[in-house]
Image: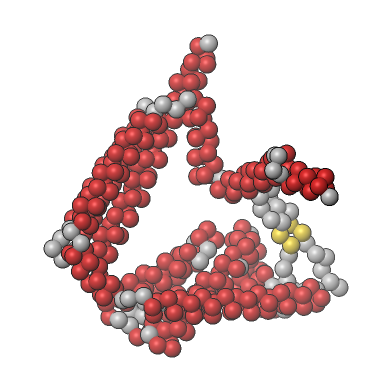
Amino acid sequence: MIYWIREIAGWGFVVAALYVMRIGLNLALLESPKIVEASVVIFASLGLLRAGILLIRISTVARICQLDRQEEKQT
Amino acid sequence: MSEPSKFVPASTLLERSQGSSQFDSLLVMAVIGCTTGFLLLLAPDMNLPLKICLAAVILLTLKYWGSVSVFLAVQVDLFFREPRRSETFQGFTGVLTVCLIVGLLMFINRNREILHRAASLSVSLTFQRFINVFRGEIIFDSGKAVREISQMMTGALRGTAVLAGCVFVSRMLLNTLPDRRSFNDSLQTWMLDQSSVPQFSMLLVAIVAAWLVCNEISWRQLTGEQAKLYLRSVFLIIHHADLRQLVRRRLKLRRKAARELSNLKSPHGILNQKNYAGEKL
């Protein structure tokens, strides 16, 4: 169960990162673009993306490890 | 009579063993005094009781965070002063202020080990030590003290040289860089002139999204062994960064040794080249 919570939290982070990235792009694509502000926002979104991907990866490998152990026990 | 030298063994394998220093208490007092004085100078408009509370909180966190907490306090102070364009950070006084701030941060970081040791003692013992310093009841080993003074002087000289160099180089770099307004203006004109920039940024986002999907699909194909290896490596990165550093160093050495061995065994290797040269002669 905890793996699924992690996975959902990870995907939530990824979605949030994409949303923040969109905000950053909107700042950069204004009529008078705010490049410095946009770069700061995009940098923050990359941090969020990295955290989300880490959570998803950890939950996936943890599930694989658990399945592997169950198979070992059965054999 | 000189006091026998104390030797504190390391509590774990990864910690350095700590010999006693003649000036521990004085250095702890110096660090606390300098930091308190400096923190009280920050935020001139703030009420004194609040300022003392904040200084106390920062001092209490010195054990865990070193100079990071002081650095954050400086950043917050700069942030609140920014709209008024304070003259503290301009001209010669600005250079002096920056030197003082960086010097204080270096001082705290240099004496962090002593702070750790002081923080791990009980409060009454630490207080007793301070009182002993004031009463002159500490027995000094004069030879050791002289050696330590020379080490401290060398360290201070090295620190001053590094500090002066850093401030000089950073001032040079900052003078060559454009200020924020002109930088923003030039970026805006460049972006408005180049119509391909927005398209390229959208393409970049699409590539990131595609990479994300492909990566996740490939990630789910891992074998059990690979998954275990990844979990172990992540655990090591998060919880034992120092151990990871040791492992990496050993792996690097092993790789280097293996490369040298293969170089010796290969037909074009050094050993064979030498033999070939010997045969030729």
Pick out the residue farthest to the left.
Answer: A31
- The residue lying toward the viewer, choosing from B168 and B160, is B168
Quarter where residue B28 is shown: bottom right
Q: On screen, A66 above or below A40?
A: above
Q: Is residue B132 left or right of residue A68?
A: right
Tell me if I can see residue B122 in this picture: no
Rendered location of residue B40, percent (x, y): 44, 77
In-front residue for pair B66/B39: B66
Residue at image position (45%, 27%) is: B222
Residue at screen point 66% across, 53% down:
B15
Colour convention: secondary structure
Marks counted in the figure total 0
Q: Residue B71: where, in percent of width, then height?
A: 45, 68
Please say if B203 is above or below B69: above
Considering every residue shown, the one lying at the far right of the view is: B1
Residue B172 placement, left or right of B83? right
The x, y position of residue B93, in whole percent, is: 43, 87
Q: Residue at x 67, y 43 (%)?
A: B259
Image quadrant where residue B193 sits:
bottom left
Residue B17 visible in the shown view: yes
Residue at far top of view: A75
**Which residue occupies the foreground of this view, B117 or B88?**
B88
Work out which quarter of the rendered image holds the N terminus of chain B and state it.
Answer: bottom right
Q: Which of the pair B177/A20 is nearer the observer? A: B177
Question: Is B68 placed left or right of B206 in the picture?
Answer: right
Q: Position of residue B220 (x, y in %)?
A: 39, 28
Residue farthest along the front direction in this orientation: B280
Placement of A46 over or under B136, stated as above or below:
above
In the image, what residue occupies the spot 36% across and 50% down? Answer: A47
